[in-house]
Amino acid sequence: MDKKRVLILGAAGRDYHVFLQYFKDNPYYDVVAFTQNQIPGIENRSFPKKLAGRLYKMDIPFYPESQLTYLIKKLRVDKVIFAYSDVSHEYVMHKASMCLAAGADFYLLGPSSTMITNNIPIIAVCAVRTGAGKSQTSRKIGIILREKGYKVVAIRHPMPYGDLLKEEVQRFSSYDDLKKADVTIEEREEYEPWIKLGIPIYAGVDYKKIIKRAEKEAQVVIFDSGNNDLPFYKPDMHIVVVDPHRAGHELKYHPGEANFLMADVFVVNKIDTAPKGGIKTVLANIKQYNPQAKVIMAKSKIIVDKPEMIKNKRVLVVEDGPTLTHGEMKFGAGTVAAKMYKAKVIIDAEKYAVGSIKEVYKKYSHLKKILPAMGYSHKQMKDLRDTINRAKCDVVIDGSPFDLSKLLKINKPIVNVDYELHEVGKLNLKKLLKNFKIKK
């Protein structure tokens, strides 16, 4: 029987996980290529044969997704596997139509094919859209479990944008670890807050090897998902964060809707800044589509280190990159802080954009004034720094989850903005986890 020739559509995350869990050492399939999307420049690499398993004698090539139809015909592809997150259902079906028209089958692999079973309890924190507030929820869970006396480790959804062999299993517990790994800005945004908490965080490429490493030092693992992706591990508790600023998106985006339908617990976040109509819509959808799930209502509380520096000043606002770009949010915590503390004006960052940052504004036309903290390469980090330093403003408001000043040399005063989850109502995370017990 001839092997089926497979092309995996990805974005340096779930695609590698899908390959390793389902296709590695599978004699019925031959993965002939990956396409890469969302992350600039990642298609200029390949998946190493050393990680691919005994059936692969050569590295598996990466291509831009724009070549999809050409690749199906050129590589005689039988099956296309869609394996990335935070895209509309319409987008997914457009890709399906392109594949069908080119002669290939189109597949989505679900939990039974991709979730890893584990030996220790796992709490998975997912979302319906990027930027809903997964990480602040995950960190609060970590604090609560640590106060209960448990040894806690976080495992983050993958962000392996460099040498995949070196990034097979990564562990971060210090700023030196970040420096040694030469992480991107997106990685730093996710890892740095855990380091501040004193909770180790793992990430990488091979999530079977990662959990085996983590189990050696942890009694419970928090899976801190990325975008609106599904858990990589079979969770003992599946918590899903919903953002009423984007009400209705919980039913319109892939695979966020699957998370929405699978959730054991919802955290309806940002109720202090979201429109009442959005909150009402989200709660109605929960009642209709997943009424068995528990619901926690929460505020995303803004914390500003030097609020006195904002009033009556011209400010440049820097926000979390993925939340603004493929997450499609028009503002974040930095913008909220600017308005809360009465900045004179939020300047238009696009006027000062250089290089790859200019391209970001062209690609994501919904971005107005604010600057996404993009830095997937050293060149893009330099462009981000130069954009900030060119800007004519009094103060930079850093609403990204990491400290800009630790990575970039900025020529202006910086006000740091953070955010914490504050639950309201009868049910909160502490009560939810009260009866969560493991063997010590």
Image: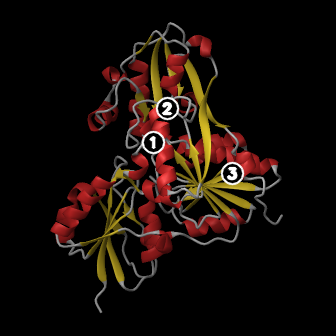
Front residue of this view, candidates 260 and 146: 260
Q: Amino acid at mark 1?
A: Thr
Residue 299 lies, with reference to residue 287, above or below; the image says above
Determine whether the residue tagged by mark 3 lies in a helix, strand or loop: loop
Tell me the mark number nearer the camera, choosing from 1 and 2.
1
Circle 2 crowding by C-alpha within 10 Å: few under 14, some 14–19, many from 20: some
Q: Which residue is denoted by mark 2 in the rendering?
A: 274
Q: Which residue is denoted by mark 1 in the rendering?
A: 281
What is the CA distance from the residue labelled 3 to the residue labelled 1?
Answer: 37 Å
Front residue of this view, candidates 224 and 165: 224
Determine whether the residue tagged by mark 2 lies in a helix, strand or loop: loop
Residue 234 at x, y percent in the picture: 58, 67
Q: Amino acid at mark 3?
A: Pro
Dot placed on the residue nearer the N-terminal end, 3 or 1: 3
Q: Quadrant of the C terminus?
A: bottom right
State yes or no: discs 1 and 2 in contact (Cβ < 8 Å).
Answer: no
Tell me the mark number nearer the camera, choosing from 3 and 1.
1
Residue 316, quarter of picture = top left
Residue 414 at x, y percent in the picture: 55, 20
Residue 288 lies, with reference to residue 210, above or below; the image says above
What is the CA distance from the residue labelled 3 to the residue labelled 2?
Answer: 33 Å
Residue 237 lies, with reference to residue 402, above or below; the image says below
Front residue of this view, candidates 183 and 84: 84
Dot placed on the residue nearer the N-terminal end, 1 or 2: 2
Q: Amino acid at mark 2?
A: Ala
Q: Quadrant of the N terminus?
A: bottom left
Give the side of residue 156 with respect to residue 103, left or right: right
